[in-house]
Amino acid sequence: MNPVDHMADPAASNVLPADTDLIRRLRAGDEAAYESLVRSLTPRLRAVARRITRTDADADDVVQEAFLSAFKALATFDGRSALSTWLHRIVVNAALMRARKDKVRASHESSIESLLPRFEAGEHQHSPARWRPVTSDDAISIEERRAIYSALDRLPDEFRTVLVLKDIEGMESKAIAASLGVSDALVRQRLHRARQALLALLDPILKENGA
Amino acid sequence: MTDPSPNRSVQPDTGTPAPHLPVPGAGPSPAARPGTRPPCADVAKGVTCEQCVNFLLDYLDGALPPDERFRFESHIAFCADCEIYLENYRKVAALCHGCGCVERLAQTPAPEKLIQAILQARAHGHTPS
């Protein structure tokens, strides 16, 4: 499957004025336009790819492949979304394809079970500890980010990927389902379990009397 | 109830819905757990903490119909454990959202080698493998 396939964006907007001129220049083969596009978007796209593939080398391969796929498909770009959104989706798809090929890192859904809350006769087996207040949006601290990324790396791929795409990248669950080729219900189930697992992993750090 | 719930799927790949939140008094109440901790006050009404936790995502997404939302919120009002768990669950999502915000604002510069590789591959007409 080509990463440009299945690129329908349910939240598509009209083409941005800034994009109109850039797309015209790109289609005309303007080298400066290509360089401008690659320089401006590569850092963000590389970060997204890195979050899914886990290694810099794989992320670089994915970003390069995605840009080349996008350039090839530029003539058919319909402008229903911003150029950056379109490329973001291509990178996500390419990264997911790369991750699927990587059999070494394949994991099983059951491996997350130990991180899910346990119940006894329907009640919490252990009372949850209240967490200290956390910052939100761009005020999040470096320590909090480190804790999140460290915990994320401990999640099985299928759960980590959904959490990254939904809660960090802000994609809609239906779009994630389309990219992964699974049902929306399964995406939501994985998201819920991933959040629960992350909660368990962050608990020792964030509980009020924790470190 | 039309919205799929993350933990209602009996078979993960099918998304088959499992039962809704039980109607109070309609089902068997779990026995109180032995030990020093008092049991959840709402369990006797037929809504367990486990069922409540299973509905967190739907609740936060506003996907629960009014009657189930009422039962969920009633349980949270009675149950300190679930109230804390809900709060922590919200914080997980907020922290991840914060990571995304920071990533979008402050990005690590891409290696020049990568940028040049992309531009050269395009110039030489390379197509993706």
Image (cartoon, helix red, strand yellow):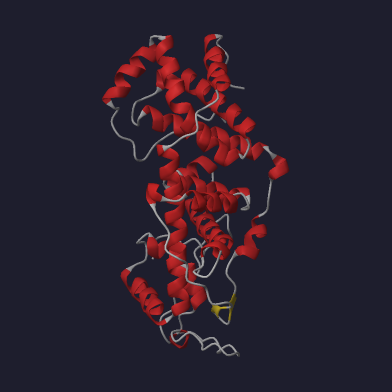
Which residue is more in the foreground, A146 or A3?
Answer: A146
- Taking the spot 50% from the left edge, 23% from the top edge, the residue there is A67
Q: Is residue A148 above or below residue A34?
A: below
- Taking the spot 48% from the left edge, 55% from the top edge, the residue there is A188
Task: Locate residue A65 relative to residue B98 in the image: left or right.
Answer: right
Q: Is residue B114 visible?
A: yes
Q: Quadrant of residue A127?
A: bottom right
Q: Is residue B30 above or below residue A48?
A: below
Task: Locate residue B40 relative to residue A13 in the image: left or right.
Answer: right
Task: Locate residue A78 relative to residue A124 in the image: left or right.
Answer: left
Give the number of marks: 0
Q: Is residue B4 visible?
A: no
Which residue is more in the foreground, A109 or A6?
Answer: A109
Residue B116 location in percent, x, y?
54, 16
Residue furthest to the right in view is A104
Residue B84 location in percent, x, y?
45, 72
Q: Quadrant where the N terminus of chain A lies? A: top right
Residue A95 location in percent, x, y?
57, 35
- Taking the spot 55% from the left edge, 12% from the top edge, the residue there is B120
